[in-house]
Amino acid sequence: MKAQDSPAVPRRRRRVSRGAPLPLLVPALIGVAFLVLPLIALLVRAPWRSMPDLLTSTEVWQALRLSLVCATAATAVSLVVGVPLAWLLARVEFPGRRLVRALVTLPLVLPPVVGGVALLMALGRNGVVGRLLDDWFGVTLPFTTAGVVVAEAFVAMPFLVISVEGTLRAADPRYEEAAATLGASRFTAFRRVTLPLVAPGIAAGAVLAWARALGEFGATITFAGNFPGRTQTMPLAVYLALQNDPEAAIALSLVLLAVSVAVLAGLRDRWMTAS
């Protein structure tokens, strides 16, 4: 009686550790130093003793509070509009889909100041749509807190759309098809089946959008201005404080740095692999 061959067990490939060649090691170390050194300098020059007083001052607190509120509102707008848009791009075939995807992702590479100018041309008092909003409803967006939310949503929404669309494309559509065969409408299948499947992607996209909205500068100052207590967010406060109170600018910069580190820590399982 012949012995049965045991099933082949795939062996895990072992990563071979070799010394890095000098022509690659030196530029790599220079790149690390170039990216890390400014952050270390920020920590070294931080006024740690006066940090509590700086962060609790009226101007800083107003900017911090406004930034958190506007970034959260911009993320909510991005979720309401961006998730259906991502589903449309991932699940529906229609003419010009590639063009629509390119236009949706354009704010990722568009200079923020150009985005602010574009928002003024569209939603300003004399803009294409802004004129109608002002005449018909008396709504004026530029240089208001609502304008900050609009500017932040404009630059942050593509991050959410890209993340959710990628998750939708990776999800198995057969679950939605099975729900449809059981009598569920397409919207019911989306709400009861698709959304739970892509919830991690939505969460990751929302975090990225919130962090991007929190750090937005160019479109905000162009479209909403820099008015303390009304449109002055943290990045704008950093820019203004750098001219008058460098210690306050460093303190606000550290807050933004902490938020960025927290975002990376929250997304480490999605973007980083174990060594």
Image: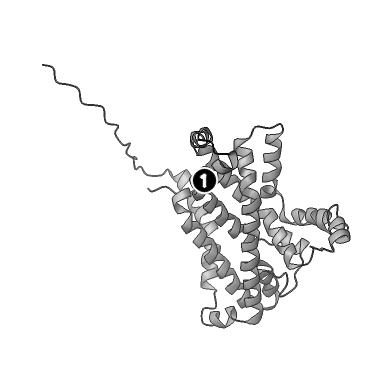
Q: Nearer the viewer, residue 78 or 117?
A: 78
The answer to whether residue 27 of the structure is visible from this angle is: no
Measuring from the top left, give residue 239's x and y in whole percent.
Answer: 69, 69
Residue 18 position by quadrant: top left
Determine crowd level at label 1: few under 14, some 14-19, many 20+ residues with C-alpha closer than 10 A.
Answer: some
Q: Is residue 197 left or right of residue 119?
A: left
Residue at point 56% right, 43% down?
188
Measuring from the top left, give residue 266's x and y in whole percent.
Answer: 47, 57
Q: Is residue 25 left or right of residue 88?
A: left
Callout 1: SS: helix
Q: Please say if 56 is above or below 129.
A: below
Measuring from the top left, give residue 212's x and y in whole percent.
Answer: 61, 58
Q: Nearer the viewer, residue 89 or 43?
A: 89
Task: Specify the amino acid type for callout 1.
Answer: Arg
Return the residue found at the far top.
1
Return the residue found at the far left.
1
Q: Which residue is mark 1?
A: 192
Residue at point 61% right, 48% down?
83
Query: In the picture, which quadrant includes the N terminus?
Result: top left
Q: Nearer the viewer, residue 89 or 215?
A: 89
Residue 256 position by quadrant: bottom right
Q: Please say if 4 is above or below 219.
A: above
Number of labelled discs? 1
